[in-house]
Image (tube, helix red, strand yellow):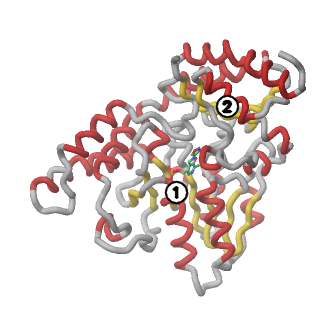
């Protein structure tokens, strides 16, 4: 059976070019870049090139730092907890975030609350959007950091980060964005966004897993989180993940080159699937904002059709999709994000996320379109207790 992968917001296929470099730096050029012999020294030019490619993808300036981390989870934890620790004993103890952040931000703030931080979780509108005025109204003299994601992983909504960062700058408050679901999907320009910190993860843009980074604007250096050796200018101790960084560099260059394709072709295929579902399958509802959305993401609720059951049936047909976030899918709870948007609890259980990539083909979308109505009809018949 042919398998169709429509869960690219959970992770993506490593691109063939990135995989090739990754393998080379696992088994041939395996030296430690801190070593002073040729095995180590040989890795340095490619590491430099990879960093340059990452700088280019997010348009960081030479003076800015990019801290390489094990992914967005570490980047988010690092920035939020370091700022909290640095402000211990000062009156800066207030944080602002949204109620639809990924758990790596949301749960980190919940933890800091237990340690005495004051956190404001701004409510997003039903379409997943936040208005910059909400930030302006929530800021206090004691606010240390505002952290608002660039694009949501479950519904794809693109949040107004440039406007939010501008307000923060005006009030001399640090701004962070989790751009994990933005890189490779639409242009991300750290300088123009105006944030002080920006997190990302390579496996969301066809790079390897377990590698990512944190952009740090010039002059906004953080305290280290991992203490030890002097790697990464003493900001993060630990032997560099050379294959991962080089693989991420290749993926970053490809992601930058592929942005036009993403905006046109990936979006066209996503829209084809979306329009088919909304126009041909009755009682279906789009979650998220129709316009301000990553071009690859479609989150749709099918009335009277339990999301988990639909995933199983899709999987039986070789189609991989997801309910909300894979990070939470072992819980039988419905999506925290959808419930935060005020979507009816029963309906939030019926939501499924399809996320495409530049490797998704029209034939794959046509196949999904050909089998989906039958699957939904069957599941609805079961849920209403009727016969098939
Ligand atoms: N931030 C966002 C917005 C994410 O979507 C994810 C992963 C992370 C952070 C964590 O990235 P990691 O590479 O450190 O694990 N999101 C998802 C998802 O939507 N489904 O599975 C993982």
Q: Nearer the viewer, residue 99 or 216?
A: 99
Q: Which residue is mark 2?
A: 311
Mark 2 or mark 1, which has the lower sequence index?
1
Q: Is mark 1 within 8 Å of ligand 1?
A: yes
**Residue 126 at what x, y percent from top left?**
81, 44
Closer to the camera: disc 2 or disc 1? 2
Q: Is residue 361 left or right of residue 283?
A: left
Label 1: which secondary element: helix
**Residue 365 at what x, y percent from top left?**
60, 18
Label 2: which secondary element: helix
Identify the residue at the far bottom of this view.
Answer: 89
Residue 105: image tag: none
Few, some or many residues within 10 Å of mark 2 (<14, 14–19, 20+): some
Q: Is residue 381 left or right of residue 132?
A: right
Q: Residue at x 54, y 56 (%)?
A: 194
**Residue 144 seen in render:** yes
Q: Residue at x 47, y 68 (%)?
A: 220
Q: Quadrant of residue 137?
A: bottom right
Q: Which residue is mark 1?
A: 73
Q: Is residue 305 left or right of residue 51?
A: right
Q: Nearer the viewer, residue 146 or 238?
A: 238
Q: Residue at x 65, y 39 (%)?
A: 156
**Residue 335 at what x, y percent from top left?**
73, 46
**Residue 183 at what x, y percent from top left?**
50, 42
Q: Is mark 2 within 8 Å of ligand 1?
A: no
| Above or below, 134 relative to 365 | below
Q: Nearer the viewer, residue 257 or 352?
A: 352
Q: Residue at x 69, y 77 (%)?
A: 141
| Above or below, 285 relative to 91 | above
**Residue 129 seen in render:** no
Query: How far is disc 2 from disc 1 in space, using C-alphas?
Result: 26 Å
């Amino acid at each position: 059976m042919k398998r169709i992968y429509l869960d690219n917001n959970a992770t993506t296929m490593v691109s063939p070019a990135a995989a090739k470099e990754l393998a080379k730096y696992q088994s041939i050029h395996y030296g430690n870049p801190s070593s002073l012999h040729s095995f180590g020294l040989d890795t340095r030019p490619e590491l430099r090139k990879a960093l340059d490619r990452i700088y280019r993808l997010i348009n960081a300036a030479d003076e800015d730092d990019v801290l390489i981390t094990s992914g967005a989870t570490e980047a988010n934890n690092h920035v939020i907890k370091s700022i909290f620790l640095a402000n211990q004993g000062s009156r800066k103890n207030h944080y602002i975030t949204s109620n639809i952040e990924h758990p790596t931000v949301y749960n980190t703030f919940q933890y800091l609350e237990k340690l005495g931080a004051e956190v404001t979780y701004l409510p997003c509108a039903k379409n997943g959007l936040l208005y910059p005025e909400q930030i302006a109204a929530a800021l206090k003299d004691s606010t240390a950091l505002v952290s608002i994601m660039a694009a949501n992983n479950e519904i794809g909504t693109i949040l107004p980060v440039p406007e939010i960062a501008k307000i923060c700058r005006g009030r001399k408050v640090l701004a962070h964005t989790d751009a994990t679901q933005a890189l490779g999907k639409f242009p991300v320009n750290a300088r123009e966004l105006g944030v002080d910190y920006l997190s990302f993860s390579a496996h969301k843009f066809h790079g390897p897993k377990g590698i990512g980074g944190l952009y740090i604007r010039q002059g906004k250096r953080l305290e280290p989180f991992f203490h030890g050796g002097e790697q990464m200018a003493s900001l993060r101790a630990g032997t560099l993940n050379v294959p991962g960084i080089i693989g991420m560099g290749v993926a970053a260059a490809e992601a930058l080159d592929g942005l036009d394709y993403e905006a046109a072709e990936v979006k066209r295929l996503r829209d084809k699937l979306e329009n088919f579902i909304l126009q041909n399958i009755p009682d279906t509802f789009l979650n998220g904002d129709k316009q301000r959305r990553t071009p690859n993401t479609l989150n749709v609720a099918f009335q009277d059709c339990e999301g988990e059951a639909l995933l199983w049936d899709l999987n039986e047909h070789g189609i991989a999709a997801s309910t909300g976030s894979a990070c939470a899918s072992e819980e039988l709870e419905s999506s925290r994000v959808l419930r935060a948007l005020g979507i009816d609890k029963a309906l939030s259980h019926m939501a499924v996320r399809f996320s495409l990539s530049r490797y998704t083909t029209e034939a794959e979308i046509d196949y999904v379109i050909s089998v989906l109505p039958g699957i939904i009809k069957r599941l609805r018949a079961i849920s209403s207790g009727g016969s098939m």
